[in-house]
Amino acid sequence: WCCLSNATTANSSTHLPLTEPLLETALVDMLGSSGIEVNQASAGFLYNTTLMMEAPSGSNSTELPDTAVSLLCSCLDGIDDGDAIDETTRHRRLLIVGRLVELYGAPAARLMTDLGFDQLLKDAQHSTKQTELVREILALVEYHN
């Protein structure tokens, strides 16, 4: 994952496309029990991938791409599970969420609200070392809702 992560950001003109099998594999490794290092590395890869994503061309876009939906839901699912996620992986998952809300705006914020992830973050913000990052994400969600 480290090599792929570097390849993703090394040169934007040759950036690696996030295919569905690659996304699924990265999500399984980020969420799985393969070891903390694998969780962290795949989360880093996915975050770097979101940095290479471009905003939708129409500012009135009301739909999220499937990739963004998968990333948002996977990154937020179980984010409040205290000991099950190490802080580095949690931090990277939250960075992915923040980037997607920043990139896609209202559709991402609505999805989070509709699925109750905003409340999950509100409840979890005091039980994580990522309090400030969670506050920033919640502010973005509120702004776009």
Image (cartoon, rainbow, N blue to C red):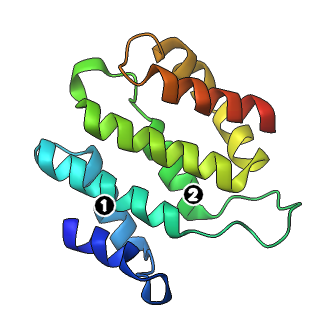
- Neighbor class of circle 2 (other Cα within 10 Å; few <14, some 14-19, many 20+) is many
Q: Is residue 31 above or below residue 132?
A: below
**Circles 2 and 1: CB distance less than 8 Å?**
no
Amino acid of disc 2: Ala
Report the residue at 75% width, 29% height from top: 142
Q: Is residue 48 above or below residue 108?
A: below
Task: Give the camera-side residue of 135 and 124.
Answer: 135
Report the residue at 22% width, 47% height from top: 39
Q: Is residue 5 visible?
A: yes
Q: Is residue 45 above or below residue 123?
A: below
Instruction: Classify residue 61 as left or right of residue 122.
Output: right
Amino acid of disc 1: Ala
Give SS at disc 1. helix
The percent coordinates of residue 85 (x first, y second) are 25, 31
Instruction: Classify residue 68 as left or right of residue 89.
Output: right
The residue at which mark 2 appears reads as 68
- Neighbor class of circle 1 (other Cα within 10 Å; few <14, some 14-19, many 20+) is many
Q: Residue furthest right?
A: 60
- Per the model, the C-alpha gap separating discs 2 and 1 is 14 Å
Q: Is residue 116 visible?
A: no
Report the residue at 66% width, 49% height from top: 102
Which quarter of the picture shows residue 62? bottom right
Quarter of the image with the N terminus in it: bottom left
The residue at which mark 1 appears reads as 26
* Earlier residue among tags 2 and 1: 1
Count of numbered badges drawn on the protein: 2
The percent coordinates of residue 25 (x first, y second) are 29, 64
Which quarter of the picture shows residue 127? top left
Give SS at disc 2. helix
Instruction: Classify residue 117 as left or right of residue 58.
Output: left
Task: Give the camera-side residue of 53 and 111.
Answer: 53
